[in-house]
Amino acid sequence: MHQSNVKNRTIFCRDNLQVLQGINSSSIDLIYLDPPFNKKKIFSAPIGSSAEGADFRDWFRKEDVKDEWIQEIKEDYDGLYKFLNNVKELSSIVNTTRNKHYLYNYCYLCYMAIRLIEMRRILKDTGSIYLHCDNTMGHYLKILMDIIFGEKNFRNSIVWGYSHGGKGKRDFARKHDIILRFVKSNQFFFNGNAVGFERQTGKKSKGGRLGIDELGRPYQDKIVKKTKKVYRYYLDEGKIPEDYWTDINSLQAGDKERTGYPTQKPLALLERIIKASSHEEDIVLDAFCGCATTCIAAEKLKRQWIGIDVSVKAYELVKKRLKEEVANPNNLLQYNKEIVFSTDPPRRTDQNGDDALIKKYVYIISHPKYKGEYKVGIASDIQARLTSYQTSDPDRKYQIKYKKHTHLFRKIEKLIHEKYENKHEWIKGNLQDIINDIENYT
């Protein structure tokens, strides 16, 4: 793990990808993001509200997707590259008229994928990430997260249910969001007791035997009638919430904390997430911080925080909210000099000299079925790339014949593919000749 190269209480006003790329690897304890939902409309704060002037476009077009994103995804996440192409193809099939909207889902997922890749890099092995979404793109985002973070690192799909707002007439009313919780490794931190609530011990708890143990701790025993197995719950520990949260409602016009920001989430929601997945003094990052609710919740809970947003309104709101919601009434200006505002991305301090150059593997993969043909490509994780090939072969006969870790990876790949005959990204040639050309490139 590396030390953070970003000061506590920093707000970046810039494209979050550029900021994420400048943050040291394995330096963030907790990431929460409430990104655009791909609703295909513009959100604006009402005139006269604290967030007046804040707006964002919630749709994504071909011109929003950079060629270098696709190149990086292709090199480092072969499965992700294939998934995105399948989404693109599906969009083309479903939208037979090929109207101007047909690639929006593909473009949105490319936008999210390249950012999630960086978030995984900067997250500590003990860290967690909570991605807030809804039924618009949640099913796609779950697959995206499975690929980038690994299916084994999926922990919860939290349903946040609320009752306010309009009611459905032709459908069941849509009254919930989804929060996908993933971790980076099995070393993750989680403290459910920090967000536990008092257990009900009367009829509402469906029975149970109350008692006090030899240490004086009150408990409730629940007995399974069929097996007589006893489950003991200590009342001073509280009950860890299930993965459906209906006790925190969405913000309404009259709520004191409401700023008018169109997608503002309640403090209680962020406080639960932060308490459960971080310690005091840990670093919490919100890559789409909007009206700064994550920053405010982190400050209240004695965590360090970093916020990123393309709008300067986030900086204005965090100052205003710290003054009104957190500061000592006798010292309302206590945070004025402590908030760092930057329009420049940070510079990584975890790389020096040659380490600062991005290196990837140039690899050669073979299969006995294709004699005299070799796949020459680029990957950051060579074993993951081999695995992606093996999944398509029941006999698992793909083999890595050669690999070289170098910062010249793109130039070398270009040379090989230009020099040798190509066939669907596989090349024909003598294996030793190909290896010699790679080794001798300077």
Image (cartoon, helix red, strand yellow):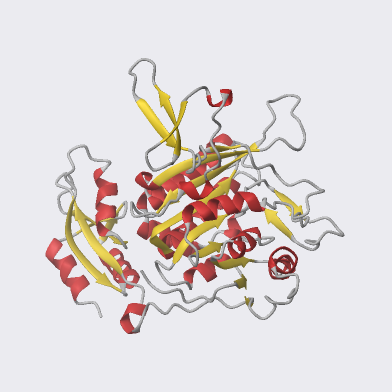
Identified at 49% across, 38% down, the residue is 235
Question: Looking at the image, which is closer to me, 59 or 344?
Answer: 344
* Left or right, residue 414 beside residue 114: left
* Left or right, residue 431 beside residue 415: left
* Left or right, residue 365 beside residue 154: left
Question: Looking at the image, which is closer to me, 360 or 121?
Answer: 121
Residue 238 in picture, x, y percent from top left: 50, 41
Residue 112 in picture, x, y percent from top left: 53, 54
Position above or below: 169 against 236: above
Extreme residue in the bottom direction: 353
Quadrant where the N terminus is found in the figure = bottom left
Identified at 47% across, 77% down, the residue is 5
Residue 131 in picture, x, y percent from top left: 53, 50
Position above or below: 169 against 105: above
Position above or below: 370 against 57: above
Q: How many marks?
A: 0
Identified at 60% across, 42% down, the residue is 134
Q: Quadrant of residue 349?
A: bottom left
Question: Looking at the image, which is closer to me, 417 or 421?
Answer: 417
Question: Looking at the image, which is closer to me, 137 or 46?
Answer: 46
Identified at 34% across, 19% down, the residue is 228
Residue 278 in picture, x, y percent from top left: 47, 58
